[in-house]
Every structure is written in C-alpha cells, then in structure tokens.
Image (tube, helix red, strand yellow):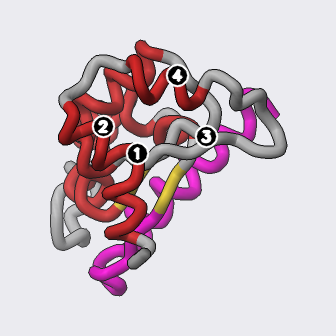
C-alpha cells in the first residue's frame, strides 16, 4: 500500500487526463490525496514528454492538473512535499485532510499551523478551498 497505491492512483489520474475526461467534463474537479499521488513531482516531465503525443487534447497536460485537480496531504504532514506541492500547484489547489483511519493524524493541526505560508494561504488550505469545491 505504501508505494503501489500512490503510483496506481496517480497513473489513473493521468489516464483520465489523457483519455480526454476533463475535456468532456470541463467542470469536473478531482481531489487526489497524498500530495497529488506523485504527479506534482513529475508534472514538468509529463508536460514535456506527453504533450507532444497528446495533440488531441484541447489544452496542455499540465493545465488540466493545475485547473481541475485539488490535492490533500492525506496524513503526510511533511514539509518538503508540502513546499513542492505549494510551489507547483499554489495554495488555491491544496486542501487540508488527514488519513483517517489509516494514518496517525496527531501532527496534522500542528503542521497546518506551523508550515511556512501566508495567513491567506493557510485559510485557503485549512477550509476555504474545501468550502469552494464541495460547496459547503
């Protein structure tokens, strides 16, 4: 579960993009856990290599991920992954989440309170983005 889940879930999300699902459903918003299931780390590579062959898509591959996907930490309260995701995706595409019942979540609140970000970004990540996408 530690590696395969993340790899397979990220692969499925990428397949959704390449299959044109987001072109057919332009209002669709996908939420991926675990800091985007490795996609933010590889997003530039995907954009560089796959955009050349996916000429049938209406937009560049990275645009789909940056405009129609939200990511959550899902209990992975780690600063390097957070900073990478924040840099790649921006605070508007990150939502706070724990990994109940699978992970230990006692550090979640502390992480959210202490991670280096502006108060406005903290509010978006803590609740604002979820309120928006889930219409709460």
Q: Can you identify the residue that label 1 sits on?
A: 126
Residue 70 is labelled as none
* Disc nearer the start of the sequence (3/1): 3
The N terminus lies in quadrant: top right
Q: Are marks 1 and 2 in contact (CB under 8 Å)?
A: yes
Would residue 106 appear left or right of 35 to someone viewing this image? right
Label 4 to label 2, Cα distance in Å? 12 Å
Q: Can you identify the residue that label 2 sits on?
A: 122
Would residue 93 appear left or right of 72 to someone viewing this image? left
Q: Can you identify the residue that label 3 sits on?
A: 74
Label 4 to label 3, Cα distance in Å? 15 Å
* Disc nearer the start of the sequence (4/3): 3
Using a 10 Å C-alpha cutoff, classify the residue at mark 1 as few (fewer than 14 neighbours), some (14 to 19) or many (20 or more). Answer: some
Q: Main secondary structure of the magenta part?
A: helix
Q: Quadrant of residue 61?
A: bottom left
Dot 3: what SS? loop
Rendered position, 126 above or below 80: below
Verify whether residue 132 appears in magenta. no
Q: Which residues are magenta?
A: 1-30
> Which tag is nearer the camera, tag 3 or tag 2?
2
**In the image, what residue occupies the spot 20% across and 56% down?**
63
**In the image, what residue occupies the spot 47% across and 42% down?**
36
* Disc nearer the start of the sequence (4/2): 4
Using a 10 Å C-alpha cutoff, classify the residue at mark 4 as few (fewer than 14 neighbours), some (14 to 19) or many (20 or more). Answer: few
Would residue 3 appear left or right of 118 to someone viewing this image? right
Q: Nearer the viewer, residue 79 or 119?
A: 119
Q: Are marks 4 and 2 in contact (CB under 8 Å)?
A: no
Q: Can you identify the residue that label 4 sits on?
A: 110
* Disc nearer the start of the sequence (3/2): 3
Dot 1: what SS? helix
Label 3 to label 1, Cα distance in Å? 13 Å
């Amino acid at each position: 579960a530690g590696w395969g889940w993340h790899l397979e879930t990220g692969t499925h999300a990428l397949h959704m993009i390449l299959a044109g699902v987001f072109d057919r459903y332009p209002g669709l918003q996908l939420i991926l856990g675990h800091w985007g299931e490795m996609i933010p780390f590889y997003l530039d590579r995907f954009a560089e290599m796959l955009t050349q062959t996916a000429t049938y898509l209406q937009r560049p591959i990275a645009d789909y991920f940056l405009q129609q996907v939200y990511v959550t930490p899902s209990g992975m309260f780690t600063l390097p992954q957070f900073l990478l995701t924040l840099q790649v995706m921006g605070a508007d595409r990150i939502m706070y989440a724990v990994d109940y019942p699978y992970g230990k979540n006692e550090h979640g609140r502390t992480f959210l309170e202490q991670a280096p970000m502006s108060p406005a970004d903290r509010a978006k990540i803590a609740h604002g983005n979820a309120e928006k996408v889930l219409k709460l």
